[in-house]
Image: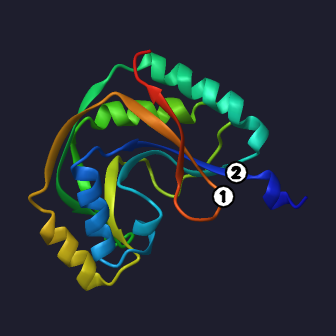
């Protein structure tokens, strides 16, 4: 068994509900973003992190404890932003619910079972284009400038990835339970 066979990649995210989730995923695909086929619209709480599969039960227990301490909250997505020139990314802005996302992300990362080096400080957002031409980034930025979605976040999801196809939901964690 190789070392790669003993590693699972996980991520934790808030799913963007319908009708907005498919709209944002479709717009990402229309921009030519190669990740659109593998990553549905989401707000990341813990980015891709490699772990040993035998650590999953402890991580799931930690995530359940985090979810139990956080109440559901309103998330308002509105307009677009960009990380340019630092990185070539366009995203939908979190207009309300920023603090709640930051608290969740911080709590999720506070365990010995999850360690991930961050290239940038955590900034809650929904990516809608990256790894595309500057013209495609500009077009998505303009097209979604008037975007708005308001919904209640009552759960987050643990995803896993084997390196093939789409990220797969492994388990939902209901907030306040």
Secondary structure, mark 2, is strand
Q: Is residue 116 above or below residue 132?
A: above
Q: CA distance from mark 1 to mark 2?
A: 6 Å
Secondary structure, mark 1, is loop
Name the residue located 13 percent from the left edge and 49 percent from the top edge: 148
How many neighbours does mark 2 have within 10 angstroms: few (below 14), some (14-19), or many (20 or more)? some
Q: Is residue 9 left or right of residue 167?
A: right
Q: Is residue 66 left or right of residue 123?
A: right
Q: Which residue is mark 1?
A: 162
Q: Which mark is residue 8?
A: 2
Q: Earlier in the sequence, mark 1 or mark 2?
A: 2
Q: Is residue 97 above or below residue 17?
A: above
Q: Position of residue 47 (x, y in %)?
A: 52, 50
Residue 83: in sight, yes or no?
no
Name the residue located 58 percent from the left edge and 31 percent from the top edge: 110
* Quadrant (top left, top right, bottom left, bottom right) of the N terminus: bottom right
| Proximity of marks 1 and 2: CB atoms separated by less than 8 Å | yes
Q: Is residue 60 above or below residue 135?
A: above
Q: 2 and 69: which one is in front?
A: 2
How many neighbours does mark 1 have within 10 angstroms: few (below 14), some (14-19), or many (20 or more)? some
Q: Position of residue 153 (x, y in %)?
A: 31, 32
Quadrant of the image occupied by residue 2: bottom right
Quadrant of the image occupied by residue 85: bottom left
Q: Position of residue 38 (x, y in %)?
A: 47, 64
Q: Position of residue 120 (x, y in %)?
A: 46, 56
Q: 106 and 25: which one is in front?
A: 25
């Amino acid at each position: 068994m190789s070392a790669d066979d003993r590693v699972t990649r996980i991520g934790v995210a808030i799913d963007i509900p319908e009708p907005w989730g498919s709209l944002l995923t479709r717009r990402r695909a229309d921009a030519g973003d190669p990740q659109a086929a593998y990553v549905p619209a989401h707000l990341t709480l813990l980015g891709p992190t490699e772990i040993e599969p035998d650590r999953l039960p402890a991580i799931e227990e930690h995530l359940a404890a985090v979810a139990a301490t956080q109440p559901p909250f309103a998330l308002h997505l509105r307009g677009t932003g960009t990380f340019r020139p630092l990185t070539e990314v366009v995203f939908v802005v979190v207009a309300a619910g920023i603090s709640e996302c930051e608290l969740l992300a911080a709590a999720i990362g506070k365990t010995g079972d999850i360690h991930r080096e961050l290239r940038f400080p955590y900034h809650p957002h929904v990516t809608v284009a990256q790894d595309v031409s500057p013209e495609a980034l500009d077009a998505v930025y303009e097209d979604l400038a008037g975007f708005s979605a308001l919904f209640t976040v009552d759960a987050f999801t643990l995803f896993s990835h084997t390196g093939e196809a789409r990220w797969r939901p492994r388990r939902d964690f209901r907030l306040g339970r």
